[in-house]
Amino acid sequence: MPALAPPRRVLLNRTSLSNTFMTQPQQRNTAGRIFGGFLMRRAFELAFTTAYLFGGRLPRFEEVDEVAFHLPVEVGELVQFESAVLYVSTPEDGGDDAAPGAGGGAANPNPDPDDPDAASLGLLRCGSDTSDGRPRAHVEVRARVMKPEDCSSVVSNTFNFTFSYNEAIAGSIRLPLPANLEEARRVVQRRRMDSLQEAAAH
């Protein structure tokens, strides 16, 4: 129940922003389809705005994480970009993010990726290094090609970005909470990918 959630928690879908536009011929690549760099720029602009509104402070761009091009986007298609803050890494990971009764102790070494609590209660301890004291917001942007005639849509692209904030807000920044299983799976997938990238870097 939302009323019983810790004060710093916010539902993941409340962090979302979106915009919709029609693709134009000047955005074509040499193959006659929409240039991927154009889509990435639009995704970054939305992600930056999302991080700014979410944190209440001007964010600093840290990195582009996984980018997936699932389907080509054609000229004249209606494209909707939707963003959300999947999770936040803070220097105190293990405190407010800990499972009830865990006392901020060790994380579950074998979390179930289909268990929404594994994401919402922070049982997957991974993500960007916060040793510099700066909290980090992990923002996902999904692009959908809309088909109004069929009342349908399909995901064409997925973009992931990481932004950081001044360490002064580390103790007050809000922590996203998945509201359903699909959102929880997205969070777990993103955390797992970040963990693999971090392990590879070391």
Image (cartoon, rainbow, N blue to C red):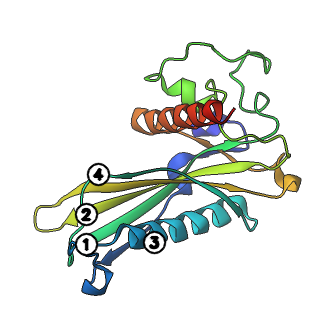
Rendered position, 30 above or below 53: below
User: Which circle's residue, 4 or 3, is located before the other in the chain?
Assistant: 3
Coordinates of residue 112 in the picture (x, y in percent): 49, 17
Q: Which mark is residue 4?
A: none
Q: Is residue 88 left or right of residue 35?
A: right
Q: Are marks 1 and 4 in contact (CB under 8 Å)?
A: no
Q: Are marks 1 and 2 in contact (CB under 8 Å)?
A: yes
Label 2 sits on a secondary structure element that is strand
Q: Give the Cα distance between marks 2 and 3.
A: 14 Å
Q: Which mark is residue 42?
A: 3
Q: Give the Cα distance between marks 4 and 3.
A: 17 Å
**Foreground tag (2 vs 4):** 4
Rendered position, 39 above or below 76: above
Q: Is residue 83 left or right of residue 163?
A: left
Q: Amino acid at mark 4?
A: His
Q: Give the Cα distance between marks 1 and 3.
A: 14 Å
Q: Are marks 1 and 3 in contact (CB under 8 Å)?
A: no
Q: Mark 1, residues whose alpha carbon is within 10 Å: few (<14), some, or many (≥20)?
A: some
Q: Give the Cα distance between marks 1 and 4.
A: 16 Å
Please state the total of marks drawn on the protein image: 4
Q: Is residue 1 left or right of residue 95?
A: left
From where the camera sits, is residue 19 visible? Answer: no
- Residue farthest toward the right in the current orientation of the protein: 168
Image quarter where the N terminus lies is top right
Q: Which mark is residue 145?
A: 2
The residue wearing badge 4 is: 70
The quadrant in which residue 131 appears is top right
The residue wearing badge 1 is: 78
Rendered position, 128 above or below 18: above
